[in-house]
Image: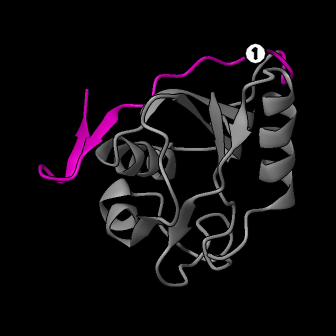
Amino acid sequence: MVTTPFFARPARRWKTSASCAALADAIAVCDEDATVSDILRFDQPMAAANDEGGTRDPVLIYPRLKVIDRVYKTRPYVIVDDVLTSGGHIAAGITILREQGADVDLVVCGVSAEKFPVDDPFAKVDRTIPDFDPSLGYWVG
């Protein structure tokens, strides 16, 4: 398994957030053959979606996202993020990694931002993120 932390603040395109890195490391510890591969970066600074008016749209994120190191084509990938909102950046990241030959099996996020209050904020949340097809320019599935 390869855990790939997704950096939380696009403006810090050269550095993964400490929370994403720590979560990726904690997951990797559970598998003695696991590797943490911090390989996703934007090619230019981008505003953060939560407080700087940036985008969560994979159509806008995808062309700016790059793989900066080797992709292990024979190992399953787990993308790790600290907070999941719309899933747009995750969908773009999955697409980029799959285009490079990665087998993305799972996304693990520390927190799922929900639009409405939930009864148990600490309950496990399962979500399906629609695929993103850059040739179509929109989410599919």
Which quadrant: the C terminus? top left
* Label 1 crowd bin: few (<14), some (14–19), many (20+), radius 10 Å: few
Asked whether residue 112 is in view, the answer is: no
Query: x, y (%) of residue 92?
Result: 40, 51
Residue appearing at x 32%, y 34% in the figure? 131
Query: x, y (%) of residue 44?
Result: 49, 84
Residue appearing at x 47%, y 48% in the figure? 71
Q: Secondary structure at mark 1?
A: loop
Q: Main secondary structure of the magenta part?
A: loop
Per the rendered image, the range of residues in magenta is: 120-141
Which quadrant: the N terminus? top right
Instruction: Write down the quadrant of residue 2 in the picture.
Output: top right
Q: Which residue is mark 1?
A: 124
Q: Is residue 10 left or right of residue 95?
A: right
Q: What is the total number of numbered labels drawn onto the structure image?
A: 1
Residue appearing at x 79%, y 31% in the figure? 28
Q: Is residue 37 left or right of residue 75?
A: right
Asked whether residue 83 is in view, the answer is: yes
User: Colour scheme in the image?
Assistant: one colour
Q: Residue furthest left?
A: 136
Q: Is residue 138 above or below residue 109?
A: below
Q: Is residue 92 magenta?
A: no
Query: x, y (%) of residue 42?
Result: 50, 72
Q: Decide which of 2, 133 is in the foreground and name it.
A: 2
Instruction: Write down the quadrant of residue 24 in the picture.
Output: top right
Q: Decide which of 46, 122 is in the foreground and name it.
A: 46
Residue appearing at x 63%, y 77% in the figure? 52
Q: Amino acid at mark 1?
A: Lys
Q: Is residue 15 left or right of residue 69?
A: right
Query: x, y (%) of residue 80?
Result: 67, 40
Q: Is residue 135 magenta?
A: yes
Q: Residue furthest bottom?
A: 44
